[in-house]
């Protein structure tokens, strides 16, 4: 992903809670630690975060509760005002927008899904989904037609006259998803959308979500505290702790090369073979003697397990998406990953 | 005063230090009382220089508002608007000759309408209650009075709701306004009914219009509270969802916040309606026709049977209005299957429309279906009178003795004792209580409230009110507490008793006077009796709620420790329930104060009596000073109980 113009770009974003946050931030050493700021009576919910999110990318922001991930996503959508730094959406600094411009931006470009759904209890499924369209003044017929389309899309056809309390949690979140998609947003924020659901439903909703994303190809910021969920969905993962981003990278790079002790602790229990792709372990070809059929670089080590165990070559060629050899895989190292041997 | 001397005790914090100061204060209070003979007059009764002419100031202020600022034109304009609305409902309900000149609607049609509303809100049982209430009214020949009362409620309640919604929303928007409004609401909700009437009489005069306006003013505060509460309670994610949908501020309020707060707003509506009913009955004192006036006349004429009939009507109305508005608040929208035809979707409307048309047509042929005149009406008053006479005669030895005993041995000695106490001793005693409960701040608050009462110049009258209320709450506790414990024994019993309490609480306070006047006649015992009845209800209620609310785990732990039922009650349930029970005591005091003031018209010597006089001479200043004196008593108790209960809850770990 090397799109030159990111859809969302934030630079040195700060969000402090406390008596006079702006003045305090102005005199603050940017390297100040979390505890030092807390000791001064301020809560740094977001600390000096810089991120770029490219067109069509799915960035998963991941962290434990209280790590500032929900606050960060609210800074990106300007549901809360930031204390310092800058957030740009499609090149516009959203902090400078007037209320009207901000409303227009949300009405045309942004959708958001909430952890506890945020549905309006007095409206039917149909009217909930049509709500954003109603807000921007679309007439009844177009907005109903469009709402029905998205309701069908999320698999709730036939339930459009139900009220939220008549639906299960999973169904309610489908309504939340449908509502956020009604205006065909370019940017889609999801704040722990599946955390309130039980594990089986969660899995089902993740599949559903991947299906939708394949179809729609939106730019997505997805919040979760569940690392498995992050690994399943993400193009890139940003791991947050105490308001700061510890590491932001592709899943297999995070697993293979954790940037900090905190991240390392996080991935300790992860089965690396299921995350790491052969291409990520491939070394430059230089000088290796590559023979025989190449392995598919797009497959994970665990998907290649049988082959890795049965093959007797020490070095395996790895092919890229177009079939050409892109590198060499050390079979012994791959087996180490597969067996979970520590380095 | 002696209190300042004790301030110099070491600055130790915590309960011990607080108790020591309280003990010193208590001892000084006792000393002041014991040494009354040696005290200078200044410490026995508030001296003249301490009594400030608050009433004159208030009168001057009101005169300024009315004449110089021309507020009277505003109020008159508002009153004229209300009068126009009143004329419309009056025409519809009892055929007053005003626009739109289509009334009176036949009683059968109104009964059918009520039943249809009841059915729509909560099914058959409510339909029956609503319909039969009106059948009773018509058959008993009370139609016109009831309609007079209802026509006022029909105007006052919506206006109150609207005003409350507006003010509540403003208060929610502006924290400054909220800060100003909150103490005002506290005072407003503890002012006795009569205190509201006097300014209205000055600005509007007497009659239905004034009755409606005093009803509106009286019933607005709960709506403001519930609007504020409801708007503050809307989950943040729902609001964020609204923001992300691109809602403007107005859209957010109109489509997101207010509808999501629906349940709380409707609870507010319920409270408004009940307050309206209570006030509209009392507004008979300022010339409001209707059930209240009739009841007042009958009670004054000691026509017990007829008053019971009216009492039943008022009670039925209260229960019906309460159940309907509560059902509305809890009613959840439900979807109908796809393809349901229009007729079935709107079947209640269709059935109502056809039945109403049918009966309206029939009533043109059979006048009895249109109106039941006095001559055709039933009356239970003769048998009721006979039964009551029998009861009164049978119980007479007991009531006679009780009356004699209470008056001679309890009430008069208590009253004389209260009046004998030097006011300084009372103030220091209250400070001791305040200090024990909440430290210096609470002590000063107690001093301020009762100090102001002393400065109002109505000390003796206030002490009579205090004695009636204290004694009545004491009796109410003796009755309510064991009943509450008995009622909390099993789930089913608790539900039954709570239902009875709920129902009793919907009755307008006036109703409670009927049985006690019947039994005791017109005297202090009847007043105390009415207050006890009225004040016992919240006590029973909160005792049950407190005892039932004790966490199951604690009880299981006690059972497994081998505690007997009695031990569990005394060592586990009661201590944990006490904070909740105290809330009941608090309400009980509030209710008593209201009731004592209302009971004034059957002859008391307390603040209420003076308030009646202020009402008849339209003396706003005096009326408000008296009203505030009553309010301050309530607010002081409220402060003490709230502080105590919060501290206790914290200590018990029931609250962070």
Image (cartoon, coloured by chain):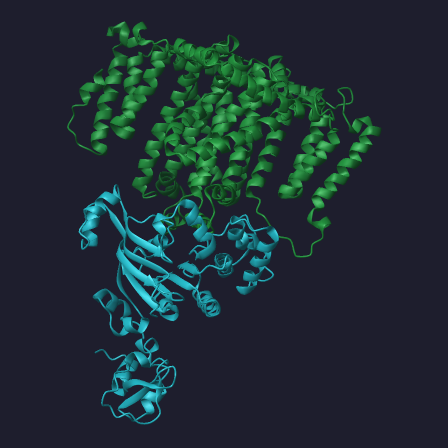
Chain A drawn in what color? cyan
Q: Quadrant of residue A298?
A: bottom left
In the image, B512 versus B220, the foreground residue is B220
Q: Quadrant of residue A69?
A: bottom left
Tell me if B363 is positioned left or right of B407 in this view: right
Query: Vertically, is A206 above or below B53?
Result: below
Q: Which chain is green?
A: B
The C terminus of chain A lies in quadrant: bottom left
Position in image of residue B408 (x %, y %): 45, 12
Query: Vertically, is B26 above or below B271?
Result: above
Position in image of residue B469 (x %, y %): 43, 20
Camera sees residue B516 = no
Which residue is located at x 31 percent, y 59 percent? A64
Tell me if A210 is positioned left or right of A255 in this view: right
Position in image of residue B71 (x %, y %): 49, 16
Query: Vertically, is B467 above or below B167?
Result: above
Q: How many marks?
A: 0
């Amino acid at each position: 992903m090397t799109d030159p113009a990111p859809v969302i770009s934030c630079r040195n974003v700060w969000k402090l809670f406390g008596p006079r946050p702006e003045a305090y931030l102005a005199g603050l050493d940017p390297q100040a630690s979390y505890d030092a700021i807390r000791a001064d009576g301020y809560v740094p919910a977001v600390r000096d975060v810089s991120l770029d999110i490219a067109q069509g990318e799915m960035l998963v922001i991941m962290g434990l509760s209280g790590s500032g991930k929900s606050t960060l996503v609210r800074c990106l959508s300007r549901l809360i005002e930031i204390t310092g730094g800058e957030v740009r959406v499609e090149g516009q600094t959203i902090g400078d927008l007037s209320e009207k411009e901000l409303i227009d931006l949300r009405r045309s470009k942004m959708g958001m899904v909430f952890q506890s759904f945020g549905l309006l209890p007095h409206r039917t499924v149909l009217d909930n989904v049509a709500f954003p369209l109603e807000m921007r003044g679309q007439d009844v017929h177009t907005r109903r037609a469009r709402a029905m389309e998205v309701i069908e899309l999320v698999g709730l056809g036939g339930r459009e006259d139900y009220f939220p309390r008549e639906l299960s949690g999973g169904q309610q979140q489908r309504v939340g998803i449908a509502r956020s998609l009604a205006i065909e947003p370019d940017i889609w924020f999801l704040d722990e959308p599946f955390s309130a659901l039980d594990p089986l439903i969660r899995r089902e909703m993740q599949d559903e979500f991947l299906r939708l994303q394949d179809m729609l190809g939106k730019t997505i910021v997805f919040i979760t505290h569940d690392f498995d969920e992050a690994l399943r969905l993400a193009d890139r993962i940003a791991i947050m702790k105490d308001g700061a981003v510890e590491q932001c990278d592709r899943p297999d790079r995070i697993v293979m090369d954790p940037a900090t002790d905190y991240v390392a602790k996080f991935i300790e229990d992860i089965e690396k073979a299921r995350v790491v792709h052969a291409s990520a372990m491939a070394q430059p070809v230089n000088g290796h003697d590559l023979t025989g059929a190449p392995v598919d670089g797009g497959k994970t080590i665990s998907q290649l397990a049988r082959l890795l165990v049965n093959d007797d070559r020490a070095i395996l060629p790895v092919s890229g998406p177009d079939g050409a050899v892109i590198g060499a895989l050390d079979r012994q190292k791959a087996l180490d990953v597969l067996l979970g041997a520590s380095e | 005063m002696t209190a300042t001397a004790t301030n110099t005790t070491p600055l130790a914090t915590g309960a011990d230090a607080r108790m020591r100061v309280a003990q010193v204060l208590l001892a000084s209070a006792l000393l002041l009382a014991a040494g009354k003979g040696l005290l200078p007059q200044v410490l026995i009764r508030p001296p003249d220089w301490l009594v400030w002419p608050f009433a004159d100031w208030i009168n001057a202020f009101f005169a300024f508002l009315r004449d110089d600022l021309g507020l009277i034109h505003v109020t008159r304009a508002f009153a004229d608007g209300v009068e126009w609305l009143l004329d419309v409902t009056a025409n519809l309900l009892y055929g007053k000759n005003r626009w739109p000149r289509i009334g009176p609607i036949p009683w059968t049609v109104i009964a059918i309408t009520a039943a249809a509303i009841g059915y729509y809100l909560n099914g058959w049982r409510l339909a029956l209650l609503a319909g039969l209430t009106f059948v009773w009214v018509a058959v008993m020949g009370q139609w016109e009075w009831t309609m007079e009362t209802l026509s006022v409620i029909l105007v006052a309640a919506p206006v109150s709701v609207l005003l409350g919604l507006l003010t509540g929303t403003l208060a929610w928007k502006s924290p400054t306004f909220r800060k100003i409004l909150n103490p005002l609401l506290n005072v407003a909700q503890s002012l006795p009914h009569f205190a509201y009437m006097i300014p209205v009489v000055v600005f509007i005069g007497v009659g239905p219009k004034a009755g409606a306006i005093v009803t509106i003013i009286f019933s607005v505060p709960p709506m403001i509270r519930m609007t504020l509460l409801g708007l503050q309670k809307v989950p943040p994610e729902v609001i964020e969802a609204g923001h992300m949908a691109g809602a403007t501020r107005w859209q957010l309020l109109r489509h997101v916040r207010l509808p999501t707060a629906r349940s709380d707003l409707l609870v507010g509506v319920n409270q408004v309606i009940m307050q309206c009913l209570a006030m509209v009955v009392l507004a008979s004192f300022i010339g409001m026709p209707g059930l209240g006036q009739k009841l007042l006349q009958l009670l004054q004429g000691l026509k017990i049977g007829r008053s019971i009939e009216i009492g039943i009507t008022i009670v039925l109305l209260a229960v019906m209005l309460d159940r309907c508005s509560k059902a509305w608040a809890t009613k959840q929208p439900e979807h109908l299957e796809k393809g349901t035809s229009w007729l079935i979707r709107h079947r209640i409307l269709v059935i109502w429309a056809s039945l109403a048309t049918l009966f309206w047509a029939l009533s043109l042929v059979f006048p009895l279906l249109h109106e039941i005149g006095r001559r055709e009406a039933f009356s239970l008053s003769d048998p009721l009178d006979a039964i009551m006479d029998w009861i009164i005669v049978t119980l007479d030895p007991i009531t006679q003795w009780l009356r004699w005993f209470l008056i001679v041995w309890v009430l008069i000695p208590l009253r004389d004792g209260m009046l004998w106490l030097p006011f300084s001793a009372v103030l220091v005693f209250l400070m001791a209580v305040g200090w024990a409960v909440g430290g210096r701040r609470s002590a000063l608050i107690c001093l301020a409230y009762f100090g102001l009462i002393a400065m109002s110049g109505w000390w003796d009258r206030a002490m009579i009110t205090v004695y009636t209320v204290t004694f009545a709450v004491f009796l109410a506790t003796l009755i309510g507490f064991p009943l509450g414990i008995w009622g909390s024994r099993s789930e089913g019993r608790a539900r039954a008793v709570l239902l009875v309490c709920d129902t009793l609480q919907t009755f307008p306070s006036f109703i409670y006077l009927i049985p006690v006047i019947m039994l005791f006649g017109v005297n202090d015992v009847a007043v105390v009796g009415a207050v006890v009845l009225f004040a016992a209800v919240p006590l029973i209620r909160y005792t049950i709620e407190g005892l039932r609310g004790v966490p199951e785990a604690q009880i299981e732990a006690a059972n497994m420790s081998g505690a007997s039922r009695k031990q569990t009650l005394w060592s586990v349930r009661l201590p944990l329930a006490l904070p909740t029970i105290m809330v009941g005591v608090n309400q009980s005091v509030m209710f008593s104060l209201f009731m004592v003031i209302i009971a004034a018209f059957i002859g008391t010597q307390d603040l209420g009596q003076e308030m009646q006089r202020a009402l008849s001479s339209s003396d706003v200043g005096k009326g408000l000073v008296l009203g505030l004196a009553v309010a301050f008593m309530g607010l002081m108790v409220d402060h003490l109980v709230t502080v105590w209960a919060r501290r206790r809850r914290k200590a018990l770990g029931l609250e962070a």
